[in-house]
Image (cartoon, rainbow, N blue to C red):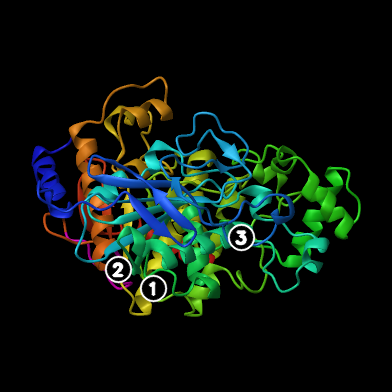
C-alpha cells in the first residue's frame, strides 16, 4: 500500500528540481536561429517547444538508403509548433509508444526548453524511442518533454529510420559511393541528430558538453551501440539505458556480405533480379509501403533473417557488439544508469525444460531450484523468468559492472512498480516499457486508456509520487552525473563487491538493496560468459 509520507517527500522534489518562476524573471525567446534558418516555437505553461525541426534532408528518392544528408536551409521564419511525421513502420494498434502520422520523410527532432531565460547553459537530455528498431516515433503523448524542460533541462527527441529503411544492405549499394557508411541508416540518423545537437543546442540555451543520451528497449540498445561505436565517442557525456540489454541477447549483427544476401532476397521477393545498379534503382522506385512490408514488432522475427537484416556489422559504425566492447574496455567514457523491469521482456523460446536448462551445464540443478523453488512453475513460467534474466536483467548488471570496473560512475536500477489501476492485470510485476510514463512524469488517464481500453481512471497519489521520484533521479543525473539529490533515498554507485541496485518496489518505495535476484543473476552470468 502507498505510504502518505512518501507523497509529501516527493512533492517537495518539484521545487527542488524546477526553475524559479518569479513574475519578474526574464523570458527566453520563442524564435531562435539554427544553422538552416529561424524557427518559431510555442510557449505554454512554463515551457517553450520547438517541434518538427529537420536535422537532415528527406531520405527519399535517391537518398533512400544513403547516410543522412544536410538539411536544406529555408528563408524567413519556419513554424515549429507541430511534431513532424514519424518514420514508416508496420502498425500495432493501441500501442502507446506509436504515432499515427507516418512518412518516409521523417528525419525531424523536437526541442523543449524552460520558458525562463537562464544565466548559464542548461544540461541536455536526448531521447531515443524503442520499438524493436522497426516501430516507434516522437509523436506519442508519453514521450513529450514538457516535464523535463519545466524542471531545468533542454530536452530533445529524435526520429530515426526503421525496419528496411533503417537497416539494409545490397551489392549495388556497396558499390555506390564507396566511401560512405553502409547499412545502418537508423544509427546514422541517431548520430546525425546528436551532431546537430552539438552544433545547434546552444541556440536553445543548452550545453553541448552536458548531453545525456537515454532510451528504452531498442532505444536503450541504441545507446549501448553508440557507447560501443567509434563514431559515438564525444557526442554525449552521460547515458541511461532502460531495458536495453547489454550483452548479445538482442541479436547478433550479421556482417555486410550476409546482410547483402538478405537484401538480394528482399529484392527477389519484389520481383527484382540481380544486385547491380539497375536493380538498386528499381528498389529505390518501390512504393514505400512495399519496403515497409508490414514489418513491425509482431512480424520482424519471422522475417529476420529472410528479408530483413536488422543491424549490420559494417566495420566502421558497428565494429563489435556492446558486450565485446565492454569486455575489452573500449566503451565510451561516460557515466551510466542502467536497469530493467521486474517482469521484463524475455527472448527465450526453448521447447522443453531440458533445453531451457541446458545452458546452465553443471549448474542445472541449482538453476532449476532458483527459477522454480516450489517445483510448480511449469515451462512457460520458468522460461519467462530465464528469458527475462538472459535478455534484460543480467545484461544490465553486466553493463553496470563493466563501467564500474573502469572507474566510471555506474548506477543500476530495477523498476517493479505497477500503477494502481493495473495491479490486478500485472500481477507478476512491471512489464517491459511500463516505466516510461513514470520517467517522463506523463502517467495519467490518457496512458491508462491507451494501454487498456477496459480500464479507466486517473493516476493515484502513489502513481504520481513514483513518477516524481524517478523523474527527479533522471534529472539529477542529467544535471550532475549523479542521480542523488535532496529528499531522495540514497542510490549507491554500483560495485561488483556489493552488487547493490535501486529498487522501485511494489509499494512505490525507492530503496537501495543488494540484488534480491543475485542467485539467478550469478547463474545467468556464468552461463553467458
Q: Tell me, for residue 82, which label it has, or none.
A: none
Secondary structure state at the residue bearing disc 1: helix
Work out which residue is located at the far front of the displayed protein and give it.
76
Answer with left or right where residue 3 lies relative to residue 146: left
Contact between marks 2 and 1 (CB within 8 A): the answer is yes
Work out which residue is located at the far right of the displayed protein and give it.
273
Say which residue label 2 marks.
Answer: 494
Q: Which circle, 2 or 1, is nearer the viewer?
A: 1
Residue 376 quadrant: top left
Chain part drawn in magenta = 490-500
**Quadrant of image for the N terminus:** top left
Q: Residues within 10 Å of mark 1 (few under 14, many from 20)?
A: many
* Sooner in the amino-acid sequence: mark 2 or mark 1: 1
Say which residue label 1 marks.
Answer: 403
Q: Which circle, 3 or 2, is nearer the viewer?
A: 3
Residue 181 quadrant: bottom right
Q: Residues within 10 Å of mark 2 (few under 14, many from 20)?
A: many
Say which residue label 3 marks.
Answer: 68
* Sooner in the amino-acid sequence: mark 1 or mark 3: 3
Amino acid at each position: 500500500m502507498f505510504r502518505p509520507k512518501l507523497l509529501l517527500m516527493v512533492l517537495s522534489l518539484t521545487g527542488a528540481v524546477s526553475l524559479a518562476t518569479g513574475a519578474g524573471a526574464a523570458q527566453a525567446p520563442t524564435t531562435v536561429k539554427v544553422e538552416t534558418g529561424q524557427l518559431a516555437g510555442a510557449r505554454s505553461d512554463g515551457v517553450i517547444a520547438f517541434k518538427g525541426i529537420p536535422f537532415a534532408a528527406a531520405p527519399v528518392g535517391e537518398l533512400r538508403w544513403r547516410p543522412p544528408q544536410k538539411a536544406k536551409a529555408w528563408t524567413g521564419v519556419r513554424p515549429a509548433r507541430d511534431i513532424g511525421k514519424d518514420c514508416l513502420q508496420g502498425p500495432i494498434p493501441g500501442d502507446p509508444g506509436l504515432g499515427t502520422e507516418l512518412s518516409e520523410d521523417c528525419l525531424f527532432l523536437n526541442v523543449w526548453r524552460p520558458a525562463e531565460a537562464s544565466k548559464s547553459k542548461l544540461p541536455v537530455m536526448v531521447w531515443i524511442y524503442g520499438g524493436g528498431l522497426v516501430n516507434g516515433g516522437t509523436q506519442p503523448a508519453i514521450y513529450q518533454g514538457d516535464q523535463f524542460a519545466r524542471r531545468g533541462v533542454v530536452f530533445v527527441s529524435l526520429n530515426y529510420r526503421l525496419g528496411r529503411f533503417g537497416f539494409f544492405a545490397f551489392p549495388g549499394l556497396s558499390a555506390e559511393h564507396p566511401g560512405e557508411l553502409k547499412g545502418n541508416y537508423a544509427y546514422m540518423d541517431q548520430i546525425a541528430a546528436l551532431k546537430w545537437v552539438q552544433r545547434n543546442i546552444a541556440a536553445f540555451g543548452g550545453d553541448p558538453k552536458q548531453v545525456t543520451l537515454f532510451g528504452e528497449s531498442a532505444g536503450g540498445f541504441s545507446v549501448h551501440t553508440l557507447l560501443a561505436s567509434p563514431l559515438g565517442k564525444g557526442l554525449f557525456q552521460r547515458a541511461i539505458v532502460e531495458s536495453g540489454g547489454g550483452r548479445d541477447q538482442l541479436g547478433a549483427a550479421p556482417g555486410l556480405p550476409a546482410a547483402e544476401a538478405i537484401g538480394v532476397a528482399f529484392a527477389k521477393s519484389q520481383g527484382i533480379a540481380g544486385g547491380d545498379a539497375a536493380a538498386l534503382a528499381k528498389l529505390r522506385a518501390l512504393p514505400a509501403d512495399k519496403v515497409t512490408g508490414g514489418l513491425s514488432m509482431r512480424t520482424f522475427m519471422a522475417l529476420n533473417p529472410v528479408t530483413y537484416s536488422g543491424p549490420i556489422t559494417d566495420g566502421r559504425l558497428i565494429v563489435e557488439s556492446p558486450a565485446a566492447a565492454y569486455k575489452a574496455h573500449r566503451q565510451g567514457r561516460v557515466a551510466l544508469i542502467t536497469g530493467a523491469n521486474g517482469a521484463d521482456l524475455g527472448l527465450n523460446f526453448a521447447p522443453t525444460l531440458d533445453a531451457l536448462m541446458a545452458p546452465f551445464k553443471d549448474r542445472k540443478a541449482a538453476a532449476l531450484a532458483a527459477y522454480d523453488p516450489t517445483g510448480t512453475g511449469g515451462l512457460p513460467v520458468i522460461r519467462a523468468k530465464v528469458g527475462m534474466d538472459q535478455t534484460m536483467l543480467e545484461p544490465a548488471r553486466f553493463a553496470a559492472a563493466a563501467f564500474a570496473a573502469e572507474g566510471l560512475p555506474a548506477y543500476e536500477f530495477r523498476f517493479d512498480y505497477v500503477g494502481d489501476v493495473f495491479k490486478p492485470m500485472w500481477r507478476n510485476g512491471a512489464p517491459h516499457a511500463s516505466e516510461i510514463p513514470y520517467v517522463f512524469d506523463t502517467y495519467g488517464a490518457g496512458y491508462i486508456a491507451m494501454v487498456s481500453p477496459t480500464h479507466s481512471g486517473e493516476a493515484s497519489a502513489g502513481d504520481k509520487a513514483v513518477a516524481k521520484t524517478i523523474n527527479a533521479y533522471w534529472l539529477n543525473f542529467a544535471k550532475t552525473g549523479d542521480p542523488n539529490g535532496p529528499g531522495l533515498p540514497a542510490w549507491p554507485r554500483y560495485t561488483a563487491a556489493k552488487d547493490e541496485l535501486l529498487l522501485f518496489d511494489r509499494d512505490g518505495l525507492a530503496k537501495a538493496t543488494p540484488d534480491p535476484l543475485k542467485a539467478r543473476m550469478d547463474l545467468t552470468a556464468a552461463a553467458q560468459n
